[in-house]
Structure formats: structure tokens, C-alpha cells
Image (spheres, grey):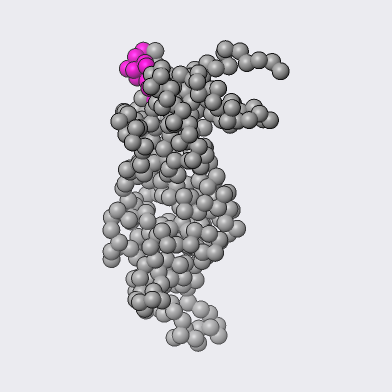
Amino acid sequence: MTPQSESDFQFDVFLCHNSKDKSEVKQIGEQLKQQRLKPWLDEWEFRPGLPWQRELGRQIGHIKSAAVFVGSSGYGPWQEHELDAFLREFVKRQCPVIPVLLPTAPQQPQLPIFLQSFHWVDFRQREPEPMGQLIWGITGIKPESKQINSVIEAQIKQEKNLTIEEKINYQFLEDLLKTENFQEADKQTKNILLFSLEKKIDEGLGKKEIRSLSSDILFTIDELWMKYSNQKFGLSKQKSIWEDLLLPQKGFMSLLSCFKKNKPNNSDKDNWYQFARDIGWYHTNPRTGRKEWIPYASLDFTFNAPEGCFPYFRNWWEVMGFNQHDPGRCIALMEKIDKFYNLSN
């Protein structure tokens, strides 16, 4: 077997991550390659047929720096082992260890105690420019330096020429749906929509924002949800349930309209609560007998959930408060869905 040369160890940065965040980390890794840096990522560098733990141990002793990524999935079990090894290397040879918050990271991420004292790179924000900050941490070259400033400026110029639709990467959402991780896919759906309106992750979507959403983006999100849920979840599924609730019955069924839940004189609020019951968001508590909203964490995030249960768009305006405006927000979304749904047919 041909021995590894010294050049095999000349990696600039080790990408330490939770496997659930791999698609986001790969995107950053590709951008680093464009800046003529050499990132080490398990998927790119592990040779099939060899013990990966041994190879990982060999590389950790030579790579120049480490980027520790934190996203919506938190820490993975192997991240802790990797961090322990890099902490020893940091003490031994002052190897930079850079905490990196991914766009999906929570507002108050939980970092290990030793990482809390490090200056982190935040991809949830635009300023300071996160890629330049990461390159600075890896290379020691400040973003203002002429050595990388022109590269960053070219990247920014390229991004400015892209539409919002072109900037959005749906791969992470698709990966979550493929693995039936509906709770994280639901959160990522909200993140995509906030990004499309250039809003921060701690902001909400009211009626005005919902009406401003791109029909193309909503259509793509709906396609992914419908495809990977076997047509059970998605915006168009919710729209169908809403229509069934509102449309009057014809023929013989019209004689039974007085017994139907969607009576013609139902208010928007009545329809909103009935819709929420139908899709599994609102119920009568079997223990107390009280009508109440099911807590988000208590929803069934499996295929056993009722049809139309996801995306849970009520969370889109959570920070604005749940109040009398909820029915109007729901109606605004249904009207928006109706527009892209009709355009696609």
C-alpha cells in the first residue's frame, strides 16, 4: 500500500459537525475551497474500507485549525470526542478552534463551557461578514486585507446578482423530509421563509409579510412536503382542507347543512378553530375537558399525525403573539396558497 505523503496532511481546517447539519457544512466547505483553502470533511476524505477512527486520529494531529459547527440539531456524540482531541491539540500547539453558528442555530445556542470563551463566527448575521470572519480564523488574515478582500468582494457582487429564489438552498429541507424528521423540517421551512423576506430568525410573519411571500418559494416548499409525506402534509393539502371546511355542500348534502360543522354563518374565528381541530393543532383536553391548543412539542411529528398537520404555520407569527389576528393570518396564507396553486395548474 502506498504510504501517505506529507502533502496528505496539509489541510487548513477540520470541519467538526453534527451529521444532521452535513448539508449546510458542505456548502461552507465548498466556499472555502473556492478561496483556495483545503477543508477536511469526513465525507470527502475517508477512504472506504479503512477504520475511520484511526484515520481521524492521524489527521487531527496535523490539521492547522478546527471549525466547530453548531446548528439546529445541537451537538452530535462524535463531535464531543473530536472536540476533546482538538482541545488537547489547542493546548499543545495553539491550534485555532473556531465555533461557527450555522444559519439554523437557535438564538441562544448551547456551547460547551470551554468554547464559550472563544470568539465565534455567526452565519445567522450578515455583519461582520461570516465567511471573511471564518477565513480570518483559519488563516490569520483579516477580512480587510487585500489578500482576501477582493475575493470576498467578488463573492458579494455575485450574490447581489442573484435573486432571493436563487440564493435559497432547499437541500437541507429535502434531506430532513427524506429522513422523516418532520419537526426539524418544519423549523427549516420557517427559516427559509424568514430568509426570503430578509428577516432574522427571531422575527415573525404577520398578514403583511405572508402576503409578500414569493409564490415560487411557497410552491417549491409545498412540492417537497407533499412529495416526501406521500401527499399527507403540505401547504396545498392544508388549502384543500380549508376549502372543504368553507365550501357549501351541493345536492342532497345541502339538506344536511344545518348539521354540518361549517355552517354558512360561521365567523372567521369559528372556521379557524375548526380548521385547527381538523389538522390536529387544537383539541378538547381529555383530562380537563377544556378546549385548548396542543403544545408544539407535544404534536405527533410522525406519519401518524393528521393530514395537513405540517407545516405548522401558526409558529410563523409566534413572536407576534397568538391573538385575535390569527384567523386573518390564516386567511391571508390560504389566499396566497390559492394564487400559487392556481398558477401551477
- The magenta region covers 134-146
Q: Is residue 75 above or below residue 179?
A: above
The number of numbered badges drawn on the structure is 0
Residue 128 in magenta? no
* Image spot of residue 63 (x, y percent): 49, 20
Q: Residue at x 28, y 64 (%)?
A: 323
Residue 189: percent from left, percent from top: 45, 49
The vertical placement of 315 against 134, above or below, is below
The C terminus is located in which quarter?
Answer: bottom right
- Residue ID at (35%, 70%): 292
- Is residue 135 found inside the magenta-colored segment of the image? yes
- Name the image quarter holding the N terminus: top right
Residue name at image x 60 percent, y 30 percent? 52
Q: Can residue 275 be seen?
A: no
Q: Quadrant of residue 226?
A: bottom right
Classify 124 as above or below 143.
below
Nearest the camera: 323 or 180? 180
Task: Return the x and y of residue 295 as percentages of the image width and height.
Answer: 38, 63
Residue nearer the viewer, 58 or 124? 58
